[in-house]
Image: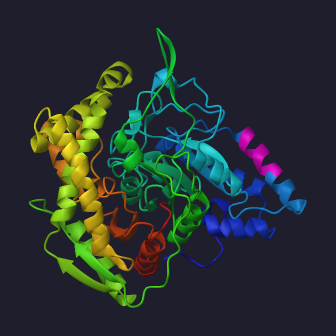
């Protein structure tokens, strides 16, 4: 449970506490940034969660923030609060390397829309959070920046692809982090490191970024992204508390019609007419949960009941099972054209991991699905979106595991084909959501056998506040430590 007492050091503050203290003049932004830099110096050499940290630049920005506040400027809700930005996201003056040595020296000229939104709220970028090559693993390591460790257990993955973000948060390097998610890349790292991860509805936070280019013999050409990127990928926040995640989500909510999936405005949500119904989906098909996963679900369900929610367990949910299968089809076929680039620019780990990914998908769809199968998959997706929205309405939620296992052992996805296929099946809660575009939050429920165990809450489209309310109920009752000291 988050403590109401004021932490001893600024880096221990939540983002909400820090923003309030800075506005009240109790802490300067310079003090906050310097405290985070000291914490980075203390912990990052071991964890390797943040890369390209520039102390002089960060402190100069903090001094400007302090001067603006002293001059009486109208400041944003995150004024002076440090935030880390993922290495696959455009931040002006920093390489959008995506963990690839070949891209290490290409500094972005503009910010992505989500970074612009954070800056507009007063947040100060402090360091780039690490990710796997191409951001395509549930583990965080690459040939450019190396491996990121989990503060809870160095032998376990911090998750991926936003593993650097989650590890840095849990260690106290920054109070907020930006990530993105197309297959669990916000939610899974948050769960592995015992923090909160928010995957918003597709279109709520702008996914716009400066156009990507490639140099070819014919000249520079603009790169186009496949359909699943526009229909499934989102930007979103990671934080140590639900209240911080809620605040970050609100400031990052940026209706932007440059984004092909962007919406002009987010619908208002009314108060539910009665108790919220939470449907507990414990497992799918033949996938068996580790006992600690079931203990986390039981704890979260009890917390939600205590908060006044109605929890009903179902033995299975074929709709989610079908959605996870469709993710394996549509994402994988869209990745197929990327394979030559991965072979050319990627490291051995990503080549092996992606090879195992294709083998797992082939178990479900065959080695080379026909074009008609791909087209039919997109058609079926639309039907499943409608069915799930009808099921949830405006006051229904799903409670699921984050994964059928606790945080995986490091490099489990490249240790062998059989283990990789086990991981692929265990991650059905992470893969079933993106293909449908619904919002989901992962929140810690307990510590079991020395590891954080989280649950996932899923709501109807644009019902993030309802999902966050339920996540808050779990957090309030879980007594979770927050920082991993």
Q: Does 154 sit above or below residue 307?
A: above
How far across and down, in percent of the image, does residue 109 sit? 65, 31
Q: Is residue 25 visible?
A: yes
Which residue is at the far top? 217
In the image, the segment drawn in magenta is 56-64
Q: Does 32 sit above or below residue 105?
A: below
Please report the residue visible at 51 percent of the width from the left and 38 percent of the height from the top.
87
Can residue 58 be found in the magenta stretch?
Answer: yes
Q: Is residue 232 left or right of residue 297?
A: right
How far across and down, in percent of the image, does residue 185 sit? 39, 49
Name the chief secondary structure element in magenta.
helix
Q: Is residue 333 left or right of residue 474?
A: left
How far across and down, in percent of the image, does residue 405 sit? 23, 58
Closest to the observer, 87 or 315: 315
How far across and down, in percent of the image, does residue 39 sit? 61, 51
Q: How many labels does the image show?
A: 0
């Amino acid at each position: 449970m988050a403590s109401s007492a004021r932490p001893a050091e600024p880096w221990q503050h939540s983002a909400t506490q820090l923003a309030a203290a800075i506005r009240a003049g109790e802490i300067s932004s310079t003090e906050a940034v310097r405290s985070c830099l000291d914490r980075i110096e203390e912990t990052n050499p071991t964890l390797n969660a943040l890369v390209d940290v520039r102390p002089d630049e960060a402190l100069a920005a903090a001094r400007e923030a302090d001067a603006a506040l002293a001059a009486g400027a109208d400041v944003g809700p995150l004024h002076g609060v440090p935030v880390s930005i993922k290495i696959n996201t455009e931040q002006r003056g920093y390489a959008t390397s995506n963990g690839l040595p070949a891209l290490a020296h290409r500094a972005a000229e503009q910010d992505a829309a989500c970074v612009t939104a954070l800056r507009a709220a007063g947040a100060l970028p402090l360091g780039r959070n690490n990710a796997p090559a191409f951001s395509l693993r549930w583990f965080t390591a690459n040939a450019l920046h190396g491996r990121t460790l989990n503060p809870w257990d160095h032998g376990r993955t911090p998750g991926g692809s936003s593993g650097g973000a989650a590890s840095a948060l849990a260690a106290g390097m920054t109070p907020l982090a930006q990530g993105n998610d197309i297959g669990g890349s916000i939610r899974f790292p948050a769960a592995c490191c015992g923090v909160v991860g928010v995957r918003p509805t597709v279109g709520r936070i702008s996914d716009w970024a400066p156009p990507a280019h490639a140099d070819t013999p014919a000249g520079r050409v603009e790169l186009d992204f496949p359909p699943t990127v526009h229909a499934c990928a989102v930007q979103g926040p990671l934080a140590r508390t639900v209240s911080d995640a809620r605040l970050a989500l609100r400031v990052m909510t940026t209706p932007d019609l440059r984004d092909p999936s962007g919406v002009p405005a987010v619908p208002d949500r009314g108060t539910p007419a009665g108790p919220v119904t939470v449907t507990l989906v414990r497992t799918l098909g033949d996938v068996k949960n580790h006992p600690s996963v079931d203990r986390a679900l039981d704890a979260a369900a009890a917390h939600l009941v205590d908060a006044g929610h109605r929890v009903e367990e179902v033995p299975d949910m074929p709709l989610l099972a079908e959605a996870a299968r469709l993710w394996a089809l549509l994402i994988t076929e869209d990745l197929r054209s990327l394979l030559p680039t991965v072979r050319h620019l990627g490291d051995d780990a990503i080549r092996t991991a992606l090879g195992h990914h294709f083998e797992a998908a082939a178990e479900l769809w065959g080695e080379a699905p026909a074009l008609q199968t791909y087209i039919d998959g997109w058609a079926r997706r639309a039907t499943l979106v409608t069915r799930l929205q009808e099921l949830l309405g405006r006051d229904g939620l799903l409670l699921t595991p984050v994964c059928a296992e606790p945080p995986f052992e490091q490099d489990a996805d490249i240790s062998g084909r059989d283990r990789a296929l086990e991981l692929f099946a265990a991650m059905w809660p992470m893969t079933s959501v993106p293909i449908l575009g619904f919002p989901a939050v992962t929140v810690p429920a307990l510590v079991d056998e020395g590891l954080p165990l989280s649950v996932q809450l899923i709501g109807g489209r644009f019902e993030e506040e309802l999902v966050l309310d339920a996540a808050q109920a779990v957090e309030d009752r879980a007594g979770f430590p927050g920082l991993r000291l």
